Amino acid sequence: MTVEARSAPKREAILEATIRVLRDRGLSGLKIEEVAREAEVGKGTVYLYFRDKQDLLKALVEHHTFSYYRKVEGVVRQEASFRQRLAEVVRLRIAWVEEWRGLWAAVAREAHPTDTSGWLRGMHEHYQHLLERLVRDGQARGEVRPDLDVSLTAASIAALACSPQLEFPRETYLEHLLEVLLKGVAL
């Protein structure tokens, strides 16, 4: 077993502890000592994996974002209908947004204060490509209008489900969102 493989669970435990500390104490209350305590490791162990708090936060954003993307990729690869896969992608998106509500933008800015937009754009391109694949597949199966631009349609889907600040029952919101997307709003 490689050193990376042996250290991956500890690194992940530190990242998961970081999100718990952020939820409990907020960004201003995030301290490496608290993360170490929550992860049940020594403070020095955190520094074996991350240079500083900024490096830890950058890794956290990447870890949770790419974890979400892996789930989306699994859905895109399924043999289900476009509607079923789209519903699952949107369901995952709503859950991800709810988990990060109020934290993601602040954590991303703190993690990469000099060029947040370029760094985030790079990560978002992966998501865009996954959604383009979903749309192209839907077009190939005759389930998505062939006249729609694949990239713009994928970008529109990506913009969906940024959970509104008002509270709606999740399933009702999801079904309505799908109805609006799949059938439109105009008569």
Image (spheres, rainbow, N blue to C red):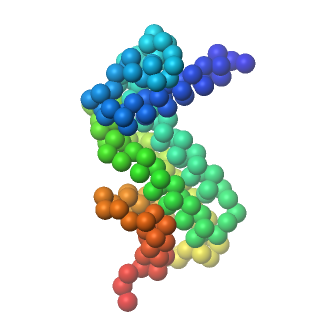
Q: Residue at x 31, y 45 (%)?
A: 102
Question: Which quadrant of the figure has residue 4?
Answer: top right
Q: Residue furthest right?
A: 1
Q: Residue at x 52, y 46 (%)?
A: 68
Residue 126 in picture, x, y percent from top left: 50, 47
Residue 103 in picture, x, y percent from top left: 34, 41
Residue 31 in picture, x, y percent from top left: 34, 21
Residue 23 in picture, x, y percent from top left: 38, 37
Nearest to the observer: residue 1 or residue 39? 39
Q: Residue furthest top?
A: 44
Q: Judge left or right: residue 157 versus residue 133.
A: left
Q: Residue at x 56, y 61 (%)?
A: 88
* Residue 179 shows in this picture: yes
State the quadrant of the N terminus: top right
State the quadrant of the C terminus: bottom left
- Number of callouts: 0
Nearest to the observer: residue 8 or residue 81? 8
* Residue 58 shows in this picture: no
In the displayed structure, 34 sits above or below 96; it is: above
Nearest to the observer: residue 130 or residue 171? 171
Q: Residue at x 36, y 85 (%)?
A: 186
